[in-house]
Amino acid sequence: MPIYTRTGDGGDTGLFGNRRVPKDHLRIEAYGTVDELNALVGLLRSEPLEADLDGQLMSIQHALFEVGADLATVGGRACLPRVEPAIVELERWIDASEAELPALRSFVLPGGSRTAALLHVLRTVARRAERRFWTLARERAPGPADEGVPEQIGVYLNRLSDLFFSWARRANRRAGLSDVPWHRAPP
C-alpha cells in the first residue's frame, strides 16, 4: 500500500474519526506544530547527550505524541493521564535545573553550546505550539471539528518551553560557557 492517498490533494485532510477539514484549520496548525516540536526533540536526541537528559527527552517525545494525537481527534482527551502528572514532573525538572544556575538578571541571547542552541530552538517552537493551541482553544469556529480541547495541554506546553529555556542555560553552564546577556543598542 503506498504512503500517498491523494485524498489531501484538494487542500483538506482527515482527523482521527474520518472528519475532513482544511489543511490550514486551527486544529491542524496546533497538532502540526506539536509534531514539529517532537521532530526537533528527536534532532536534539541525535546529539551526544547525558543519559538522564536523553531519557527525559524521550519521555517528552512520548507525551508530545499523545498530545498531538488528542489534538488530531475531535474531543480527544486520552493524553490527560500522561500530561497531568507530566506537568508536575516538568516543574521538578525545572526546579532541579534552576538550582544549578545563577539567578537570571537580564535577558539572554540564544546560543552558546550546540546543545543549548538546539534547546533554545525547542523553546521557541514550544512557545509557537502553545500559541497555536490557545488559538484553537479560544477561537474555534462552531462545528464538529471544533469541539473543545483540554486546557492542560496548554499548561504542559507552557511548562515545556520554560524547561527548555532552563536546560539551555544549564547546558551552557555545564559546557563552561556563560549566558550572553542582551544589551539594548545605544541610540
Image: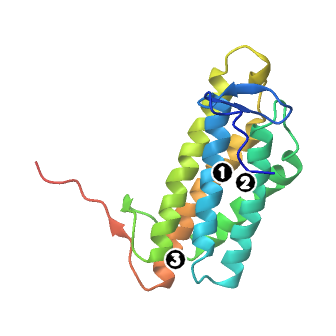
Total labels: the figure holds 3
Q: Are marks 2 and 3 in contact (CB under 8 Å)?
A: no
Residue type at the position of mark 2 = Leu
Q: CA distance from mark 1 to mark 2?
A: 7 Å
Q: What x and y, as percent, mark residue 158?
A: 62, 48
Q: Do the residues under discs 1 and 2 have CB atoms within 8 angstroms?
A: yes
Other-residue count near label 1 (Cα within 10 Å), few / some / many at <14 / 14–19 / ≥20 = some
Residue drawn at point x = 70 percent, y = 49 percent: 156
Disc 1 target residue: 35
* Secondary-structure class at tag 1: helix
* Marking on residue 64: 2
Describe residue 20's horizontal placement relative to residue 35 as left or right. right
Q: Are marks 3 and 1 in contact (CB under 8 Å)?
A: no
**Residue topped by disc 3:** 171
Q: Which corner quadrant of the image does residue 87 belong to? A: bottom right
Judged from the image, the secondary structure of the residue bearing numbered disc 2 is helix
In the image, is residue 74 above or below residue 182? above
Along the viewing direction, whichever of 105 and 167 lies nearer the viewer: 167
Image height check: is 108 above or below 82?
below
Judge whether residue 163 can be spotted in this image. no
The amino acid marked with disc number 1 is Asp
146 and 13: which is toward the camera: 13
Where is residue 82 drawn, in percent x and y?
85, 54
Residue found farthest to the front: 1
Q: Which amino acid type corresponds to the residue marked 3 in the rendered image?
A: Ala
**Residue at 74%, 46% in the rendered image:** 68
Comparing labels 1 and 2, the label whose residue is closer to the camera: 1
Taking the spot 47% from the left edge, 80% from the top edge, the residue there is 173
Residue 148 found in image quarter? top right
